[in-house]
Amino acid sequence: MNIRTAVILGFAFASVSLAAGHSHWIVTWGASASPQQDEAQMRAEKLVYENQTLREIVHSSVGGDTVRVRLSNAYGKQAVEIGAAHIALSAKGSGVVPGSDHVLTFSGRATVSIPPNALVISDPVKLAILAAQDVAVSLFLPKAAVGGGVHYSAQQTTYIGQGDLTAAASIPQAATVESWVFLSDLDLMAPERASTLVAFGDSITDGAHSTTDANHRWPNFFADRLLARSGHREIGVLDAGIGGNRILHDAVSNVRFGVNGLARFDRDVLAQPGIKYVIVLEGINDLGHPGTSAPTSETVSAEEIIAGLEQMAQRAHENGLRVFGATLTPFEGTTYPGYFTPEREVKRKAVNEWIRTGKVFDGFIDFDKSVRDPAHPDRMLPAYDSGDHLHPNDAGYKAMAGAIDLSPFK
């Protein structure tokens, strides 16, 4: 037998073994990226990293014993060099659990270059991760990194140290940011029956104004509910929320708000491994941004928002996914000047009525009903209000997750 034949047979046997084990990859944690800012602005905000290690903390939704990470240079305009990468179980702060640290490789190499607008996947690592456990991924960036692949306003602390500290037990005197940088997914090998659910939306899905490092976004609370119920414990939850995101228009004044939802749907939903379910909560910024952070020419009707939601549902269905629409939450009295108007409230109600009564989605989740004030239905219940009358607080996010019927997710 020659070498070429041995390689081919080896690949075939490996494929048969994988199929026999009925295993595949799903996502246990994930986040979406926004386009990069102007390089000068990134430098001013200390978002350019050179000869530094980023230790990024993520929170699993389901557990497993074989993991990998995906690193993204989404929207980047130049390559990003990763000089070293490690994964470990997270301890307090920047610390890692002793004995849990593993080197990450990429096609067998300890370094990797991520081309512009591309992603790379690490080789699998044997590491036992529990459900609802914090995991630390450390990336050493030897050269100035000004690529894309940044998720801003993560409500999670990332620790930064000088030099290659990827194997360090902790990062002393660490600088911090609340962004996930270049890290987009934590995947795990799971039984064939396991799957990925994507929560797709804006800042309310992203957990804006929730407690930092507490994992109190509604997708986190929803993942906890799935774990607590027999028959639902093998669904990984990926939070694809981006603050300020809209269905129909790209960000104008702030690139952190991301490209329009229809444009990012393929990358953030359809391209995910093991995907089976999608929950869509988006459209409030399509109403509120024109005339505030976007031109008034981008004013949209309820019918246009509905058409965008229909497009997402159709694309999900043609990929064999079950997709659920979520009603838009109240925003009367919001502290963002010009964001709310009575005319926009009429549109919100029209969109919500369509979500509740339409047949495009496989079902709907009434987030509006879960957090509104019964005495003032156009406003959020004070006990669930973060204070800006638009974003829920931790209790509000928990109430949203509690409003989801678990029976369709098995």
Image (tube, rainbow, N blue to C red):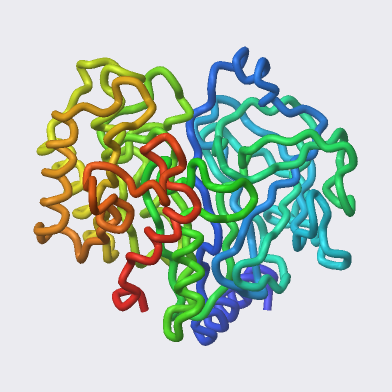
Q: Nearer the viewer, residue 99 or 305?
A: 305
Q: Nearer the viewer, residue 386 or 143?
A: 386
Q: Nearer the viewer, residue 116 or 249?
A: 249
Q: Residue at x 61, y 59 (%)?
A: 59
Instruction: Judge whether 259 appears above or below 401 on screen.
Output: above
> Looking at the picture, how far across and down is residue 122, in whole percent?
65, 55
**311 with respect to 183 (left or right):** left
Instruction: Judge whether 317 appears above or below 64 on screen.
Output: above
The image quarter containing residue 89 is bottom right
Instruction: Judge whether 395 appears above or below 203 on screen.
Output: below
Residue at the limit of the structure toward the front, as seen here: 375
Q: Nearer the viewer, residue 16 or 328?
A: 328
**402 with respect to 214 (left or right):** left
> Looking at the picture, how far across and down is residue 213, in whole percent?
64, 50
Instruction: Judge whether 14 appears above or below 156 on screen.
Output: below
**98 with respect to 37 (left or right):** right
Q: Residue at x 66, y 26 (%)?
A: 47
The image quarter containing residue 218 is bottom left
> Looking at the picture, how far across and down is residue 397, in whole percent?
44, 54
Q: Residue at x 42, y 41 (%)?
A: 203
**372 with respect to 6 (left or right):** left
Q: Residue at x 43, y 79 (%)?
A: 232
